[in-house]
Image (cartoon, rainbow, N blue to C red):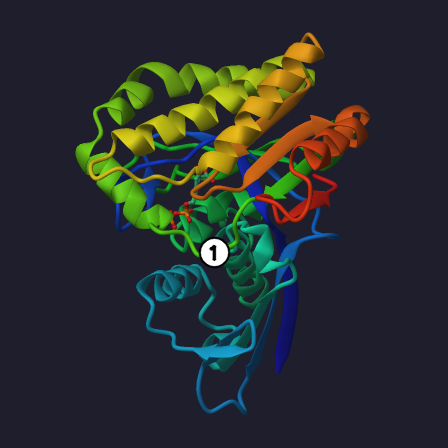
Amino acid sequence: MKIVTCVAPVNIAVIKYWGKRDENLILPINDSISASLSTDIMCAKTTIMASPLLKENKFWLNGREQTFDSPRFSNCIKAIRARCDETLPQFNWKISICSENNFPTAAGLASSAAGYACLVHALAQLYEIKGEISDIARQGSGSACRSIYGGWVQWHKGDLPTGADSIATQIAPADHWPEMRIIVLVVNDCRKKYSSTSGMKTTTETSTLVKFRAESVVNQRAKAMKKAIEDKDYESFAEITMKDSNQMHAICLDTFPPCVYMNDTSHAIVNLVHSYNEYKKGQKVAYTFDAGPNACIYLLQSEVEQFISVVNHVFPKPADIDAVEYYRGL
Ligand code: 2P0
């Protein structure tokens, strides 16, 4: 019998992944960059047991039994097993997988990235696979490849039709920028109207703006973001983060029919951040929004107390913002 347990972090993108060039292999149309949150606070956790005594494969996610039928799930298992030494005894044993997320669903953060990264990492441990696995995590959920690493991570779109070079690499470890924090402003914890997967598909099929982004904007922006992170240049980091979030949501509106993820409260948060930065005479706080109305705020520790008190003043509870979740990022 062999048992492995792994944890993997949630990640929040500052250069967004939005649109695929290959739906089956999950190959993106542009590079993206994110920070992985500390696994002390929020993570996915997966335990896998392999045993010659098990009669069938089983999978539980957050306490509920799942089938092995989902194409993405089975693609990850097949891809991992293809790299396994078939003479290992566990290769022929049945497995039992138990996965859970320790973070509140109310945070509205994508769980699939941490979940698939954790599953793939745990399978790699089980089957004693060394080397690159982010390309396999990517086949579970694109953004999962970034959760394979901690700290600041870049997902390279790659050029090969096989996707072998569409992998994640670490730009800098978690302790590179220890003052960085992330606050999640929970605007709404309902399930999103359009999944990222279907939203991206419609965008790729209908948006002209997404082509402009891919051809003329995002490559330079990813380079500038990498430099801002390496140099710990917060002002540049903040400006690029906000511009890239805004461009992703502009592209969502340019999609036909449009994918509307941000609501009036989200836009009120955008205005609040810009007013705060104007008052502070510099970019001191940065917002970014994913496929939903909740805001992720990147800021340095020195701004946390003041910014939270401003948020609580502008959005007194109970109001539009249900909670201010404060997490130590990275
Ligand atoms: C990101 N998002 O870069 C972007 C920003 C959401 C908005 O990656 O279809 O769940 O499984 O590859 O990875 C969410 O997309 O989509 C995402 P699939 P995924 O974080």
* Image point (39%, 64%), residue name: 73
Query: How many numbered tags mark residues here?
Result: 1
- Considering depth in this image, is 306 or 90 the residue closer to the camera? 306
Front residue (pair 162, 15): 15
| Quadrant location of the C terminus in the rendered image | top right
Residue at the image position 65 percent from the left and 37 percent from the top: 315
Q: Position of residue 231 (x, y in %)?
A: 67, 15
Indicate left or right for 321 with 191 as reference. right
In the picture, measured across the screen, residue 32 lies left or right of residue 125, that is left
Task: For residue 19, say whether it is visible.
Answer: yes
Q: Alpha-carbon neighbours of circle 1 within 10 Å: few (<14), some, or many (≥20)?
A: few
* Residue type at numbered disc 1: Cys
Q: Quadrant of the N terminus?
A: bottom right
Depicted 195 relative to depicted 306: above or below: below
Residue 111 is left or right of residue 283, and the answer is left
Residue under circle 1?
190
Residue 150 position in % (x across, y down): 64, 42
Q: Is mark 1 within 8 Å of ligand 1?
A: no
The answer to whether residue 180 shows anywhere in this view is no
In x, y percent, where is residue 111? 52, 55
In this picture, is 88 found above or below 189? below
Q: Secondary structure at mark 1?
A: loop
Left or right of residue 67: residue 107: right
Residue in the image at 55% along x and 23% along y: 271
Quarter-of-image position of residue 234: top right
